[in-house]
C-alpha cells in the first residue's frame, strides 16, 4: 500500500514540476514578445518622426537643459 502512495506522491510532484516549467516558459515567451513589441513600436516611431520631420519647437525640458549648458560653458 505504501508503494501506491509513493507513486501517487511522485506523480503529483512531477505534475507540479511540469506546471512550473510550463509557467516559466510562458513568462519567458511573454517577456520576449513584449520586447519585440517595444522594439517594433520604437522603430515605427522613429520612421514616422523621420518622415514627417517632427523636429518642431523644443520642449520645456530641452530648453532648460540648453540654458543650463549655455551658462556652464
Image: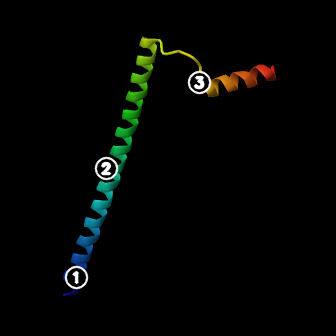
What residue does disc 3 label? Answer: 59
Report which quarter residue 37 is drawn in: top left
Residue at 63% x, 28% y: name it.
Answer: 61
Q: Is residue 34 above or below residue 43?
A: below
| Mark found first going from the N terminus, 2 or 1 | 1
Q: CA distance from mark 3 to mark 2?
A: 41 Å
What residue does disc 1 label? Answer: 5
Q: Which tag is nearer the camera, tag 3 or tag 2?
A: 3
Q: In this rendering, would 25 be left or right of 69? A: left
Residue at 69% x, 26% y: name it.
Answer: 65
Q: Residues within 10 Å of mark 3 (few under 14, many from 20)?
A: few
All told, the count of numbered labels is: 3
Nearest the viewer among 26 and 47 is 47
Residue at 42% x, 12% y: name it.
Answer: 51
**Horizontal and vertical percent position of residue 17:** 31, 63
What residue does disc 2 label? Answer: 26
Q: Secondary structure at mark 3?
A: loop
Q: CA distance from mark 3 to mark 1?
A: 70 Å
- Asked if the residue at tag 1 contacts the one at tag 2, i.e. Cβ–Cβ closer than 8 Å, the answer is no
Amino acid at each position: 500500500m505504501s508503494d501506491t502512495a509513493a507513486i501517487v506522491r511522485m506523480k503529483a510532484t512531477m505534475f507540479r514540476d511540469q506546471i512550473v516549467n510550463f509557467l516559466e516558459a510562458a513568462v519567458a515567451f511573454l517577456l520576449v514578445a513584449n520586447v519585440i513589441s517595444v522594439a517594433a513600436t520604437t522603430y515605427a516611431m522613429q520612421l514616422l518622426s523621420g518622415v514627417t520631420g517632427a523636429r518642431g519647437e523644443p520642449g520645456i525640458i530641452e530648453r532648460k537643459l540648453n540654458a543650463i549648458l549655455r551658462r556652464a560653458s
